[in-house]
Structure formats: structure tokens, C-alpha cells
Amino acid sequence: MDIDERLQTVEDEQLTVPIEVLLKNIDFLPKLSVEQTEKLLTSLPYKMEQVENKVVALEMIYDEAQARCKRVESHYKLLSIAKKQSKELLSEGDRTAWVNCQKEVQEAQNDVLKAKKALKEEQTLFNRLERNFIAVRKIASLVNDTEIAIGGSQKYV
């Protein structure tokens, strides 16, 4: 499967619901109770910390994979220079192609891509948790403002 087909399958898999449909069905969405809001306010920061720690670990793995890839490529680049001396690989393009065709170089490059994918997935999860936490904080603020307004109005009843 070529890259265009792979990109198309990702686009096809994503569910996109038009905002108009969401707004029409907003009354059917689940509502958070005060207790659920409080639980989310207390638990989401801990979950965010866990995910953030994982992001840091994945960043280190990604950096290490990049460094290893550079070392492997450099090793084979030096070997290609030796082949230049023996008249096997005379042009720079030939030497670069030879380096990129080496199995160890390809494995190192694939490791970099795998590490980057894992890192991006975890960063996406963290971003979603962060957006949820902000939304829950806003809901809690609205609930608090409502309770204050109701309490203040009870003075005049």
C-alpha cells in the first residue's frame, strides 16, 4: 500500500460530525453531575501527570533513536568513502543510495519513525486530557456561580 492509500485510509477512518449535527443533538449529550465534576477535577491532574511522564520518557526514546540512526548512517557513510577509494562508489549520490540501502540503516530509520509515532500518540492523549480538564474547570465555575446566585436570591425570598 503506497503512502497516498495509507493517508486516505486514515482520513476515511476519522469520524467527522458536522457542528450543526452536534448542536441539534446537544440536549441528548450526557450531563455531568456535581459529584462527577468534583471527581474529574481531582483525578484528571493525576492522569495528566502520568501521561506527561510517559511523554517525557517517549521523548527520550525518540531522541536516542535519532542519535542511533545518525551514528549508523555515519558508520556506513565512512564505509562508503572507503568504497569510493576502491572505485566502487564514485559519486556522492551512489554513496548516499548505498548507505540508505543498508539494512541496519533502514532499521534505525524505522525505529525513529516508531518512536515518533508513539510520542505523537501520547502527546495527543495529553492534549485531550488537558482540554477535558479545562472544560471541567469551566463547568465547575459555572456550577459555582449558579450556586452563589441561587444562594443570594434566597435572601430575598
Image: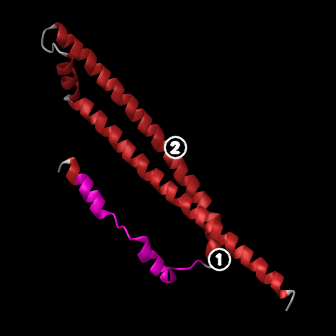
Residue 138 location, x and y as percent? Answer: 64, 67
Callout 1: few (<14), some (14-19), or many (20+) C-alpha neighbours within 10 Å? few
Residue 139 appears in which quarter of the rendering?
bottom right
Residue 17 inside the magenta-drawn segment: yes
Residue 101 appears in which quarter of the rendering?
top left
Determine the residue positioned at 54% across, 50% down: 52
Secondary structure beneath disc 2? helix
Q: Which amino acid does label 2 sit on?
A: Val
Residue 37 inside the magenta-drawn segment: no
Left or right of residue 88: residue 125: right
Left or right of residue 36: residue 146: right
Residue 121 location, x and y as percent? Answer: 41, 52
Look at the magenta stretch and give its main secondary structure: helix
Callout 2: few (<14), some (14-19), or many (20+) C-alpha neighbours within 10 Å? some
Quadrant of the image containing the C terminus: bottom right
Q: Nearer the viewer, residue 120 or 11?
A: 11
Q: Which of 57 and 84 is in front in this view?
A: 84
Determine the residue positioned at 51% across, 83% down: 27
Magenta-highlighted residues? 6-32
Q: Which of 84 and 56 is in front in this view?
A: 84
Determine the residue positioned at 54% across, 48% down: 53
Mark 1 lies on residue:
35
* Residue 56 badge: 2
Secondary structure beneath disc 1? helix
